[in-house]
Image: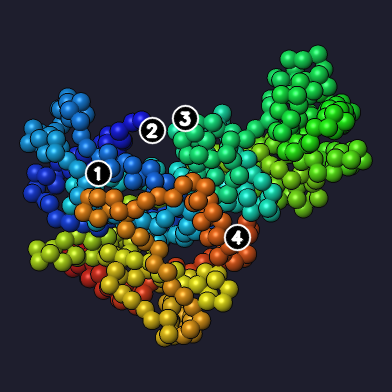
Amino acid sequence: MSTMKLTLLTDFYELTMMQGYFKAGMRQKVVFDAFYRRNPDNGGYAICAGLDQVIDYVKRLTFSEDEIEYLRGLGIFDEDFLAYLKDFRFTGDIYAIPEGTVVFPREPLVKVIAPIMEAQLMETAILNIINHQSLIATKAARVCYAARGDGIMEFGLRRAQGPDAGTYGARAAVIGGCIGTSNVLTGKMFDVPVLGTHAHSWIMSFPDEYTAFKTYAELYPNNCVLLVDTYDTLRSGVPAAIRVFTEMREKGVKLTRYGIRLDSGDLAYMSKKARKMLDDAGFTDATIAASSDLDEYLIQSLKAQGAAINSWGVGTNLITSKNTPAFGGVYKLAAIEGPDGKLIPKIKLSENTDKITNPGSKIIYRIYDKQLHKIRADLICLEDEVFDTNQDLIIFDPIETWKKTKIKAGSYELRQLLVPIFKGGECVYSSPSVMEIRDICTEEKESLWDETKRFANPHEMYVDLSDKLYRIKSEILEELSLKALQSV
């Protein structure tokens, strides 16, 4: 992906709609929102990721001669439309929530304001990038929460759905809180730590475990975590590792970043037995790492059982987000420019209340408790709305409107979540490094209440609508309802 132009990374109907707009003479400005409806894994929050790759996509969004020739060969597109594509580039505005930010359902993660053909073309690629990385970043955040401060290593490349999913998934996992990845390409591309030990094949290539461990330790004395479960963990593997550590210590080698890794068996039982053996030998600071089909639920269970593990390698279930393999983000039209140049709010109706969209060009205010700096709620508003924190703020549930909360003046702070990324087709945003985004994400997770972070029945964070937006939405819904009745 890093070496590919992604202009044709789009669904066919985006291009046929573009030609339709072109033939109909439709050049007006529109507003599209990219958002999602449900948190992954029935959780209480998600982590936004992938914006830097969206920026790169938009910067390179042009049609080459080769791409136009391919489209010509499909026999669908007319020459006047293909001539338009020759000079195509993005000229609009994009606002987005920065990567690493905690986000909630129904609020725009990306807002595109652009001529209709430009905004339409971008739908598929934006969703492809944001959906995938946000999914994996969210899964990583959950896994890290379960580990309660222990380091999580992302180990999933060999089980990922292809090179891009493995590489950009590892990027997202680090954003979500992992301390590093086994994926060397991700390490090179994004300057993140690369981590790992060795495989069972290393042990099996030598006459015995002791020889394999000793050879490895001599090569990597400052990165010596030994895989002890190839044959018999407690009777062979751990004693051989202790023998090697003892010899290193006797030679005057300062042991740093050393320990053992367990990859099978009863990890709680094995780790506690191994911990005692290491401690009795004087290696109280030796790491005990574990892998073996881990996820947040198993890690939480092992912690509850008192497992003596302080480092975790998480692979398949993280890089694929196995329990919830799709993020479910959507890209919906929210407004279209009228003949007078003003934006006309638009709504998508549905029999499912959750699928009814919010109209207009919007902003999001995050409401924090001023003293604790915890999130009280998010408030979706129209873009011209401002609020005074010295005034009481009344918010209400947009579905069950009788549920109201008064937030007292002076007790809260507001932060606008959407920031400008492109203005007039030019990028005005500089992305932080992945490790800087990881730090941002760590702070963001601290702003969540524990009740929102729990796995079972988490507290649902309020995402409310302003009075003005709610009134406009209600008026449009009433108008559409009357039209439907008149047509019967």
Amino acid found under the numbered disc labelled 1: Leu
Q: Quadrant of the C terminus?
A: bottom left
Q: Is residue 66 above or below residue 334?
A: above
Q: Quadrant of the N terminus?
A: top left
Query: Which residue lies under the disc numbered 1?
Result: 121
Q: Which numbered disc, 1 or 2, marks the residue that appears first in the sequence?
A: 2
In the rendered structure, find residue 1 and report the number of the disc placed on it: 2
**What whole-number distance in Å separates the C-alpha atoms at marks 3 and 2?**
9 Å
Q: Residue 138: horizontal and vertical position, in percent? A: 53, 50
Q: Residue drawn 14% across and 39% down?
A: 87
In the rendered structure, find residue 388 and report the number of the disc placed on it: none
Q: Visible in this render: residue 191?
A: yes
**What whole-number distance in Å separates the C-alpha atoms at marks 2 and 4?**
33 Å
Amino acid found under the numbered disc labelled 4: Lys
Q: Which numbered disc, 4 or 3, marks the residue that appears first in the sequence?
A: 3
> Looking at the image, which is closer to me, 114 or 463?
114
In the rendered structure, find residue 453 and report the number of the disc placed on it: 4
Q: Residue 401: horizontal and vertical position, in percent? A: 42, 77
Please state if 342 lies on the left or on the right of 156 as rendered: left
Amino acid found under the numbered disc labelled 2: Met
Amino acid found under the numbered disc labelled 3: Pro
Q: In this view, does 476 lie above or below 388?
A: above
User: Callout 4: few (<14), some (14-19), or many (20+) C-alpha neighbours within 10 Å?
Assistant: many
For the residues labelled 1 and 2, say whether their Cβ atoms are less than 8 Å apart.
no
Secondary structure beneath label 2: loop
Query: Which residue lies under the disc numbered 3?
Result: 163
**What whole-number distance in Å separates the C-alpha atoms at marks 4 and 3?**
31 Å
Secondary structure beneath label 3: helix
